[in-house]
Amino acid sequence: MPPPPHATSLAPSSASIGSPAKSWTNTAMRALTSFIGGSAANVVDHASDHDVRMGFAMGIPTIIHRGVAVDGSVTTRYAPNLLLPFAPFPLGSVTSGRPRELARASYTSTASKVQFGSRTFSATKDSVDAAAAFPPSKLASSRARRATSLLPSYLIDARTIQKYHAVSCPEGALQLSVAENQLCELPLTNTKLLHGGENDDHGDHAAIFGNFTLMDVLSTLASSATAKPSSLLNGDASKDAVTAAKSHVFDRDMVYYQPTQGTPGLRKIMAQYLQALLMDPITQRTFNADNLVLGAGCNAVLENLCMCLSDPGDAVLIPTPYYAAFEFDLGARAGCPVVPVNTIQFHSSNNGRGHDGPIPVEWYYPNTSSLDHAYARAVKETGRPPRILLLSHPNNPLGVCYPPAVVKQCIDWCREREVHLISDEIYAGSVYKTNNISPITGEEEKTFVSAMSLASHHSTSSTGLGLGPYIHLVYALSKDFALSGLRVGVAYTENEDIMFALQKLHDFCQISSHTQLLVERMLTATVLREEKTMPEKFVDVYLQANCNNIQSRSEKLISCLKELDIPYLSPDSGLFLWMDLREFLPPLSVTEMSDNESLASKEQRERELYLSLMKEYGLLFTPGMSMRNENAGFFRCVFTAASEDEFELGLVRIRKFVEGRRGEER
């Protein structure tokens, strides 16, 4: 049904678009006049069916009332309400319709039909009745069903099969698609964990010694009654206070409300940890603990940061391929649609070779041309500039770091365009190749350089890292330490305009005081290795051992793929490897052209291959099209998501798949 005349009138005239203040005022007045003139109270009184939805009319939070009278006529009324941005649901969000079919309807848009690359978004001029896609229900809200529809569709297929178990289901599928690290269960050897807070340089009073795992360390630290590590920093606590703290696992103040952004002690210790992990040791720039916010996981702090930097409907640019759940994390409540930054066509090294041969890693790097193209597309399709560029660095799913020159180009582009750059560096402690030969310069350089380090160069600011208002960081302990169950995420920004809002939004995703104390203890714990004479930080020893284990596991997978002549990207970081299995895609239909294959054909052919791998060969990988890869037939293999026995079985099954498929072609 077309929108009523007064709904269309809410759209700004072309003359008002260049004047945001004037457009805002005029739109508000027209909406308010329309609402009053429409006698909404009468609609409610005489309606056999009515509902109230929330949305935006040209950026103004608006109540949208849709009434169906007894005679079957439909009336819609609008009323601006400036308190609506604080409501706990997405307002005016435009969400993905491919492959999440039910997510097409959104509350508002500025275009009648929005096309984001291969994905379609349906909207009226100013308002869409979400009930068309999600019929009213007394048991579940439209926004609840809409949120779940944003989840990657391949997960539905994955839930239909039995997972591998050595005893009860030996033929089940091996789970190699979830980014978890079971290598954390491997022990540190010939090492002593020293008592926290003890001045024991030789380990005479070691808490545990010999061979122990991360879980052993956490169990020991969780039951420790020594003083809070933060109380010992810089002599902040008196001797009496420290002595008293040793008698309890819980301090008295831990049972009461905590600062929503994290305890001062953990934020200070986390800032020191990030300084050592991300910054050049010789830099004079330091993380400011007051600009650091802790929350329950990386997705929580990322969502809150995006809510502070953008409005519903503002696009987020992400280079492809990208972590599939970003679309849910950014769209479910923040209401930010993702506009993919496709990169392959914007590299001169392409030279018209097409995509049949192995794709060089540099073709996946964003550059000014690809960013400009995505920016223009976002403006065209949303009616406004994108607000955020989100980089996954080190990259998930590619398993590689962006070279420093690429990250610096993105930083400069964002500052020039006044677009916020969020660098997701959740795998920063899992970089197992410290140096690489740059595919751009051909020279050896550090594999990973944090965007924080690059953005702080040549800054004139006298405080913090000197990032300015447009550069931000998210991080978590979920990957480097495999502590996804503890839910510890970090956001860092030096944009003072959003600090208070960011802190308050974390009311909804605080970390428990006990977890914060445990993380304090872990980040400050010391160990003494058999071959060393002085204690070292546990996190430094653990991360180095973990990187060694990841690299060893990756080399086994690479050896298998080389033996089978399967193309892949040579990984240097993260928990996964990007495989090219295009050779095994089903053939194109007679109506498709290889140079211009339709999206539907790509998705169908890749899904057939995905299902075959999963159901016939017991291999559950992440399909590339779910990560908006430009070409079908690529898969992410999380080689750390299995025990050693399961991983070895996975290699056997990969060989069986490749040899079996090639045998069918003969």
Image (tube, rainbow, N blue to C red):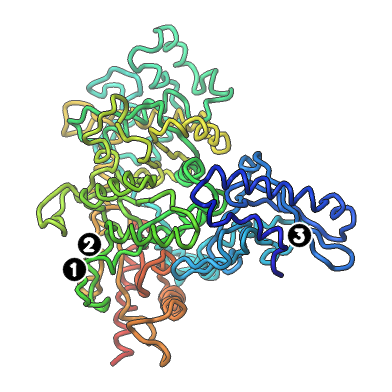
How packed mark 1 is, by other alpha carbons closer than 10 Å (few <14, some 14-19, many 20 or more), is: few
* Label drawn at residue 588: none
The residue under the point 66% across, 39% down is 83
CB-based contact (under 8 Å), mark 3 and mark 2: no
Mark 1 residue type: Ser
Q: Secondary structure at mark 2?
A: helix
The answer to whether 84 appears left or right of 167 in the picture is right
The N terminus lies in quadrant = bottom right
The residue under the point 30% across, 62% down is 577
Return the residue at label 1.
349
Q: Position of residue 512 (x, y in %)?
A: 53, 32
* Label drawn at residue 362: 2
Mark 1 or mark 3, earlier in chain: 3
The answer to whether 382 appears left or right of 196 in the picture is right
Q: Position of residue 379 (x, y in %)?
A: 44, 58
The answer to whether 407 appears left or right of 621 in the picture is left
Mark 2 residue type: Glu
